[in-house]
Amino acid sequence: MFSVHAWARRAALGLFLAASGLLGGCASAYLDASVKEVPAAQFKKPAAPGPVQLLFEFQTKGVRNAKATEMLQERVIAQVKASGLFTDVGASTVPSGASLSITLNNVPMSDDAFSKGFLTGLTLGLAGTQVGDGYVCTASYRAPGSSAPVVKQARHAIYTTLGATGGPSNAVKMPDHKEAAFQMTTQVVSNVLNDLSQDASFK
């Protein structure tokens, strides 16, 4: 018999596919509204862009989550291709040696590694039960001929409510957890790509 907390946790990205039948209409998903998508038009484009090898992985508390990686991988690849930062994006190594690794790690909001860097002021303690899932996106880019990568990080959150009369004060209600996961990924990846493009070491 699952506890209410366990049901909410199963609604998180990477587990919601297995839990969707259990949750049904009981759970509502909310996406943190403080993280906005950065349009690719705002990225600082390199003077001479080149091809890059892209590696993407979704993790749950630092451990690879194969199902979530498979679900989100093509979307992330398409987003990097549309960024205008590279001439070609693929899984294979490129002659220049340029590589971009994007990791999206799902961690509980209570984890120090997440909570210390996540400052959105979302309101907790609503009627019913509310559980927050944090997502830490890390982009590591190694430029051609460079010995040290350029690393950028951004954070996001998805909230699940059970039996609550309303959602977090600084969040947008999503149609379901799958759409919340898709939008969260697009928004947080756009932020690390923008930060990467603005870095003087990006070339």
Image (tube, rainbow, N blue to C red):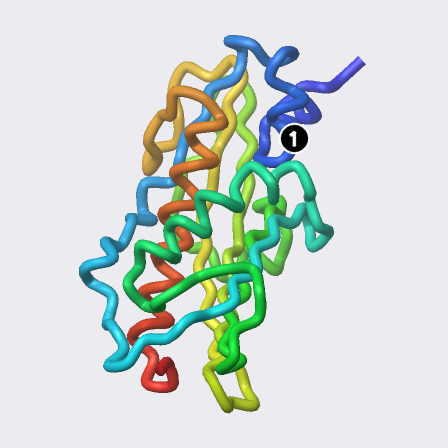
Q: Tell me what residue is drawn at x 32 percent, y 76 percent.
A: 49
Q: Tell me what residue is drawn at x 35 percent, y 82 percent.
A: 203
**Between 1 and 147, the one nearer to me in the picture:** 147
Q: Is residue 182 above or below residue 100?
A: above
Q: Tell me what residue is drawn at x 47 percent, y 17 percent.
A: 164
For this orientation, the residue located farthest to the top is 25
Of the 4 image quadrants, the one containing the N terminus is: top right
For this orientation, the residue located farthest to the left is 41
Q: Position of residue 51 (x, y in %)?
A: 42, 71
**In the displayed structure image, the side of residue 139 where residue 113 appears, left or right:** right
**In the displayed structure image, the side of residue 156 where residue 9 appears, left or right:** right
Q: Position of residue 71 (x, y in %)?
A: 56, 37
**In the displayed structure image, the side of residue 92 where residue 173 appears, left or right:** left
Q: What is the crowding at mark 1: few (fewer than 14 residues within 10 Å), some, or many (at least 20)?
A: some
For this orientation, the residue located farthest to the front is 95
Q: Position of residue 120 (x, y in %)?
A: 38, 49
**Between 166 and 137, the one nearer to me in the picture:** 137
Q: Is residue 16 above or below residue 123?
A: above
Count every numbered label the image shows and give the total. 1
Q: Tell me what residue is drawn at x 60 percent, y 14 percent.
A: 23
Q: Is residue 147 above or below residue 9?
A: below
For this orientation, the residue located farthest to the right is 1
**Between 42 and 4, the one nearer to me in the picture:** 42
Element under label 1?
loop
Residue on which the image places disc 1: 15
Q: Position of residue 196 (x, y in %)?
A: 37, 71
**Kind of residue at badge 1:** Leu
